[in-house]
Amino acid sequence: MLLKPKTKGFFLALFAALMWGISGACVQFLIQHRSINIEWLVTVRMLIAGSLLLLLARFSLVLDIFSIWQRKKDTYALLLFSIFGMLAAQYTYFAAINASNAATATVLQYMGPTVIVCFLAVKLRKIPSLIEMIAVLLTLCGTLLIITHGSLQTLSISAMGVFWGVLSAVALAFYTLMPVRLLEDFDSSLVTGWSMVIGGLAFSFVHAPWKVSGSWDLSTYLLTAFIILFASLLAFYIFMISVKLIGPTYTSLLCCTEPLASTFLAVVWLHVPLTLCDWAGTFMILITIVLLALTQRKAVTL
């Protein structure tokens, strides 16, 4: 029996979010237990996933993958998004995992929607709605609980963990807002594919993809392949389909699964100790995602 389009979209969005959540725990394992360099992992992930996505766009979706380069304004916008959106979001998230753990990094990154609310309030010179202000307050309280465990005199994670976690939230906000104009004119597979390739090429000057480090065994190969193929290429592709089937609001709500999956795996698989404050802070931030998804503003560009 074939699934209805909305039901299919629901399961696809849920699956994509789960893949992203699992990938966070995989990254933590590779960093902590196999000594994989995060700069190398970011570079290789973006180069391979971006190239495969462009091939998919060319031969499966039958798109002209070079059409995005025909106008200067599109080229400039793509280059800016590639570095300050795609690359920044990828690297800051991996760096946050390296400095703390997958659960904390993923939850802190999900402060991004609150950053967007604050940015839009300034840009549009409009006071946030009551629900948006409640969401901002919940995010601040949740973040404080996670990083202090209720005591303002000490930090429960390293200062670098807080730094990269907050920076990843800002990068996620840029990642969300920057490509709006490009996505109006080009298929999202082109925008994402090219931005991954460009970001990967740029980061190759930081860490060349052929300079492989760490301990490599079967688990290393399998987890790396999962991060590149399933958590990058497949997850993004099916997420695009789900947006078309059920719309951005419901897909955003289902993304709440990502930090939950990452947190669950971090506790069960990687034995990351989480306190009551961590769980309380996590659910506060998850509530903000639900609130903001239900009161989405019209997207604007930077």
Image (spheres, helix red, strand yellow):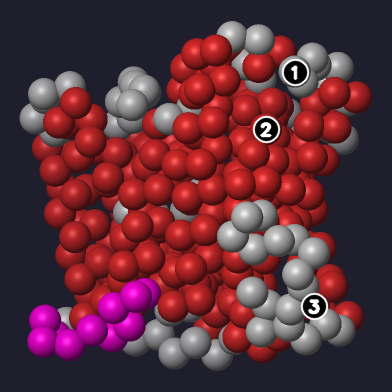
Most prominent secondary structure in the magenta stretch? Answer: loop
Mark 2 or 3: in front is 2
Element type where label 1 sits in the image? loop
Asked if the stretch drawn in magenta spans residue 153, the answer is: yes
Mark 3 or mark 1, which is nearer the start of the sequence?
Answer: 1
Residue drawn where x is 80% and y is 26% of the image: 57
Return the x and y of residue 122 as percentages of the image width and height: 15, 31
Vertical relation: 24 (above or below) 159: above
Determine crowd level at label 3: few under 14, some 14-19, many 20+ residues with C-alpha closer than 10 A: some
Element type where label 2 sits in the image? helix
Region rendered in magenta: 151-161
Asked if the stretch drawn in magenta spans residue 85, the answer is: no
Q: Amino acid at mark 1?
A: Phe
Q: Which mark is residue 194?
A: 2
- The residue where tag 3 is placed is 220
Q: Which mark is residue 66?
A: 1
Mark 2 or mark 1, which is nearer the start of the sequence?
Answer: 1
Vertical relation: 22 (above or below) 2: below
Position of 295 with respect to 27 (left or right) is left
Res. 10 image quadrant: top right
Res. 162 image quadrant: bottom left
Residue drawn where x is 80% and y is 16% of the image: 63
Q: Which mark is residue 285?
A: none
